[in-house]
Amino acid sequence: MSAWGRIGARLTMPRRLRLTREGKLFVGITFGVGLAAINTGNNLLYLLLGMLLSLIVISGVMSEISLRGLTVVRRLPARAQVARAHLVEIEVSNAKRRIPSYAIEVEDLREGQPADKRCFFLKISPSSAQVAAYRRTPQRRGRDLHTGFRVATRFPFGLFEKSREIRGEGELVIYPAVDPVRLPADRGGSRRLGGGAVGRGAGDEIAGVRPGRADEDPRDIYWRKSTVPSQLVMRERARELSPDVSLTLDVAEPSPAGDDWPARFERHVRDVASRAVAHVRRGDRVTISTTAGQRVRAERASGTDPLLRFLALVEPSKADAAPARPRRPLARGA
C-alpha cells in the first residue's frame, strides 16, 4: 500500500454513527432541557439534563461492545441464474468470551450496486455463531462481485445506529436465463436410446442379431437362433451416438449500434443459452464458437455449466477492435 493509501486508511472513521428518528427527537429534547437549565439555573433541570446525557453515553458504550469481536462469513451458492431466486447465507461469529451481541444487522455489499439485502440477528451468544440467509433474484448476467459487509446495531435504546464495515470479498457468476425449447426431431429417423442415436458398439442394449464367427465372445451367442454350433447367431450390441451441434456466436457490435442494441444482445444470449441447454439435455454434444475464435464445448457428461458460464461472461466487441483477441462473445445458433 502506498503512503497516501496508509494515510487514507488511518483517516477513515472506524465507526459510523447515524441518528434515528427517535434519536433526533431525543437529542432535541436534551438540547431544550439544557437551554432551560442554563437560563433558569434550576437544579432539577440540571439533574434531568445529566440523566439524558448519561443515556447517550451508555448507548454509545453498549453499542460499541456489541460491535466488537464480530466476524462475518458469506456462503454463496454453486450457481445462480437471471430471474431465478437463490439464497446467500451469512454467518456471524461472536469471539467475545462473556458478553453477547444484540440487535446486529448485516448488510451484504456488492460492487457497483446498491446494498438492498440485510440479515438481522437478535442475539449472538459469547463464543458462538448464528446463521441467517437472504433471498436474491438477479436481474442481469455476469460477475457479481461482493466486497464486504456493513455491520450495524441500534442497541440498546434505538437512538443511534452505529456501524462498521468488514472486508469480505466474493464472486458469483450469474448465468443467463434459460427458456424451455422444443427441438425438432432427428431428420435421419434413427432409433434413440436414452436420448442418443443408436449405432453398433459394445453397449448394454441389443440392436439385433447377425451371423457369428468362431473367434467371437461366446457370451454374445444368441442360443435361441443358434441351432447347431456351426451356425452361431450373435447378439449385436448397441451404443449411443451423440450428434454434434454447433452454435456460432457473433460478437461484432454494429456501427451505429443503436439504443436497443444492449437489449437485443441480451435476447441473443438468452436464446443461445436456451437452445444449448436443450441440446445437452437431449444428449447432443454442443460446441459454441465465436467470430473472435473462442470456443467452448459440453455434453451430457460434463453438464451445462461450461456453456452457461461462457455465455454469462460474453460481451460484444467493438467494430474497430482487433479481431484477434476480443473480450467475450455472443451467439446465433446454427
Image: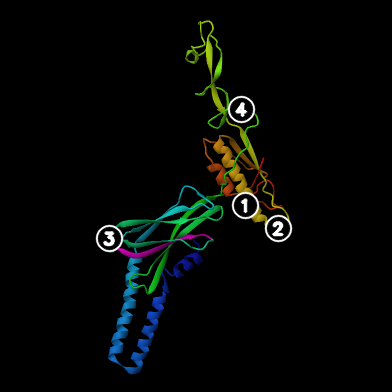
State how far apart marks 4 and 1 are (Cα).
35 Å
State how far apart marks 4 and 2 are (Cα).
45 Å
Q: Earlier in the sequence, mark 2 or mark 1?
A: 2
The residue mark sitting in front, 3 or 2, is 2
Instruction: From the viewer's perspective, tell me whether residue 47 is left or right of residue 178.
Output: left
Residue 282, quarter of picture: top right
Q: Amino acid at mark 1?
A: Glu
Residue 24 picture location, percent across and down: 41, 79
The residue mark sitting in front, 3 or 1, is 1
Say which residue label 2 marks.
258
Q: Earlier in the sequence, mark 4 or mark 2?
A: 4
Q: Is residue 258 magenta?
A: no
Residue 99 picture location, percent across and down: 28, 64
Q: Amino acid at mark 2?
A: Gly
Residue 278 picture location, percent across and down: 57, 40
State how far apart marks 2 and 1 are (Cα).
14 Å
Q: Label 3: few (<14), some or many (≥20) within 10 Å? A: few
Task: Identify the residue at the far left of this view.
Answer: 98
SS at badge 3:
loop
Q: Amino acid at mark 3?
A: Arg
Residue 190 — which label?
4
